[in-house]
Image (cartoon, grey):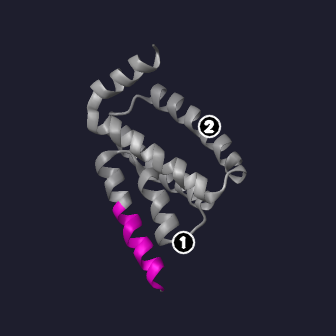
Amino acid sequence: MDGPLIASLVLCGLVGALLGVFGGGGSILTVPLLVYVARLAPAQAIGMSLAVVGVTSAVAALAHHRRGTVKGRMGLLYGASSAITAFLGGRLTHLVSGDVLMLLFATLMVVVGFFMLGGKGAADRAQASSSQ
């Protein structure tokens, strides 16, 4: 096995563990890993991350369902809307260069990080300022 493959497998294991602990954020971790470590094109990395995160989430959802901690109707509604928009977005990636995709992805990471660090109050302030 070559170095990038070994590094990718180790880091993918770490991503899976983090998904299990935090319950989300898999694409934020998986896309850069696939682009910069596994050396995939950004469009390929985004598509693969959807599959990786989808399978990981399905396994975790099953475990939570068995514990009775899943709101099935809400999960199906959220999952269906996410799957549809992910499919549509995936069909459009060929229209944008890999560099632009990575720039947009990095911007999304910064925005999400801002809201996470700011807590609920930051999200409320952003929503209030955008509606004015």
- Real-space CA distance between mark 1 and mark 2, rounded to the nearest whole angstrom: 26 Å
Residues shaded magenta: 2-14
Can you give x and y, in whole percent of width and height, for residue 45 in the image? 56, 60
Left or right of 60, for residue 100: right
- Whether 77 is drawn above or below 33: the answer is above
Labelled pair 1, 2 in contact (Cβ < 8 Å): no
- Whether 76 is drawn above or below 45: the answer is above
Residue 85's disc is 2
Which residue is pictured at 33% across the width and 51% down the height? 20
Which residue is pictured at 38% across the width and 24% down the height? 126
- Whether 80 is drawn above or below 43: the answer is above
Residue 125 in sight here: yes
Q: Is residue 35 magenta?
A: no
**Residue 97 vs residue 21, the one in the foreground:** 97
Which residue is pictured at 55% across the width and 36% down the height? 82
Left or right of 87, for residue 109: left
**Which residue, given by chain and number where applicable, does mark 1 sit on?**
39
Quadrant the C terminus occupies: top left
